Image (cartoon, helix red, strand yellow):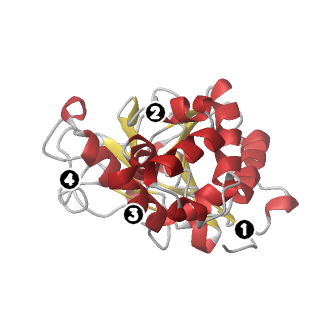
Amino acid sequence: MKLSSLFRRATSPTRLGLSEVSGESFPPPLPDETICLLGDLHGRLDCLEQFLLLRQRHFPSATLIVLGDMIDRGPDSAGVLARLQDATTGGAICLKGNHEEMLLAAIANPEDNLSTWLRHGGRQAAASFGIDEYVLEQLPAVEAAALLREQIGAATLDWLSGLPLNYRSGNVVAVHAGLDPAHPLACQAAKTMLWGHPSFAHQPRRDGLWVVYGHTIVERASKKPGKIALDTGAYATGKLSYALIDPALPEHERVMIGLINSLVKS
């Protein structure tokens, strides 16, 4: 795959095959369709727009799956949500991350949850919806939640509430934070999928599922048996990672990991 000159600043995609992965034997990823999975955006509309242009030029028919944490920390959560809501009308799938869950909890039960959300990137998200970052802290919690609800809008909040926690295609599962390796997909707790599990990083699954996830920031997106990690901290680094998995390709070419490298850092 050749990238146009517009994306020379993006790292050239690399194809990773099982021969390049150490560890025990593991069945190759085999989704039911070509899928493209996108790491944590955290308000980086600039990175998202670069990625969507790249996708349109090179793999427009791949099903797009966004791994959650679309909001908070970065400069334009509002813009990211608007853009992705448009994309879902065209077949894209957005998963709920723990930051979407924190926002919803802050609005539903502000006295217990608003300050937590604000401390973890909510101030930046609120600013993108036109709310001064300190206004919410000065208002009573219930009034602050009402202001958030008004500025974000009922349609967007309903959309966020209805986002799925995982998406499965063949033996590939997309999820925000990870899975409990001791339990099948149907028995996973919502908290595990949103926040992770202590055994996820070191204990392999025994059912042959590949888990593609974000949540935990890594210096470089990576693939090892049964796991593909895609959160490269775009909100701070300007580096947004994605994985393209094409079941029609040979095993050694099936997974391509790519990187959008914005010149602007948050």
Report the front residue among 160 and 187: 160
Residue 204 appears left or right of 124: left
Q: Secondary structure at mark 4?
A: loop
Among the two numbered marks 4 and 3 on one chain, the one whose residue lies closer to the N terminus:
4
**Closer to viewer: mark 4 or mark 3:** 3
Q: CA–CA distance between discs 2 and 3?
A: 22 Å
CB under 8 Å between discs 3 and 1: no
User: For the point 35% across and 46% down, which residue is it?
Assistant: 211
Q: Which mark is residue 161?
A: 2
CB under 8 Å between discs 2 and 3: no
Among the two numbered marks 4 and 1 on one chain, the one whose residue lies closer to the N terminus:
4
Number of numbered discs visible in the structure rendering: 4
Which amino acid does the dot numbered 3 rest on?
A: Thr
Residue topped by disc 4: 204
Which amino acid does the dot numbered 2 rest on?
A: Ser
- Name the spot of residue 212 as percent of width and height, x first: 41, 48
Quarter of the figure with the C terminus: bottom right
Residue topped by disc 3: 216
